[in-house]
Amino acid sequence: MAPPRPRAGTAVAAGVLAVLGGLWFLTGIFWASLVLGYGQLDLLVPGQIADAVIGLLLLLGGVSVLACSEAGRVLCLVAAVLALVAPIVGWALRYQRILFLVGGPTGIDPDVLRGIVVAAPFVALLVLLALPATRRWTRH
């Protein structure tokens, strides 16, 4: 008799959170240009590339986690770390007078408060992905 299938609660929550985070980063590609009114500045391209890479990694990883793939869990872990590091890089580059905007709209203007709000879901994603139940789900 086969062992029972592991519970999917944490894995499904992590997968959905990763997909939503990926969509949020992908909207960031257009957000700075269209909504903030920066237009098509060459200065925005590095941030748009970061948004695209992180967004696609989160989308691919989230869908793979929902499909019980260990590789998807690893992709989500890498993307979540990048999602946490990217705003920090943006802050550091801003002090060098380089425009590096990452992420989508939040409706929050102060940098520190926006950083906390942006970091919270990705910290939660890292915790969900590190839980033993999620590991069992992706290895099953």
Image (cartoon, grey):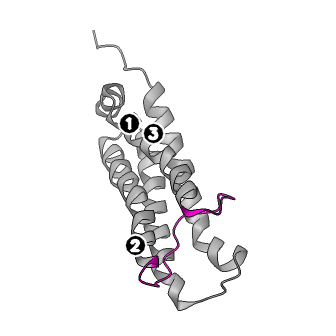
Instruction: Give the residue pinned by disc 2.
Output: 92
Q: Does the magenta stretch include residue 98?
A: yes
* Residue 47 place in picture, x, y as percent: 48, 75
Q: Residue at x 33, y 34 (%)?
A: 138
Residues at discs 1 and 2 in contact (Cβ within 8 Å): no
* Residue 70 place in picture, x, y as percent: 30, 41
Q: Give the range drawn in magenta.
A: 94-111
Numbered badge on residue 124: 3
19 in relation to 101, above or below: above
Numbered badge on residue 127: 1
Using the numbered discs, state the Cα–Cα distance from disc 1 to disc 2 in whole angstroms.
26 Å
Residue placed furthest toward the top? 1
Q: Which residue is drawn at 42% across and 44% down?
A: 123
- Quadrant that contains the N terminus: top left
Assess disc 2: are there few (<14), some (14-19) or many (≥20) residues with their C-alpha within 10 Å of its C-alpha: few
Q: What residue type is labelled 1?
A: Val
Sequence-wise first label, 2 or 3: 2
**Under tag 3, what secondary structure?**
helix
* Residue 32 place in picture, x, y as percent: 63, 75
Using the numbered discs, state the Cα–Cα distance from disc 2 to disc 3 in whole angstroms.
24 Å
Which label lies toward us, 2 or 3?
A: 2
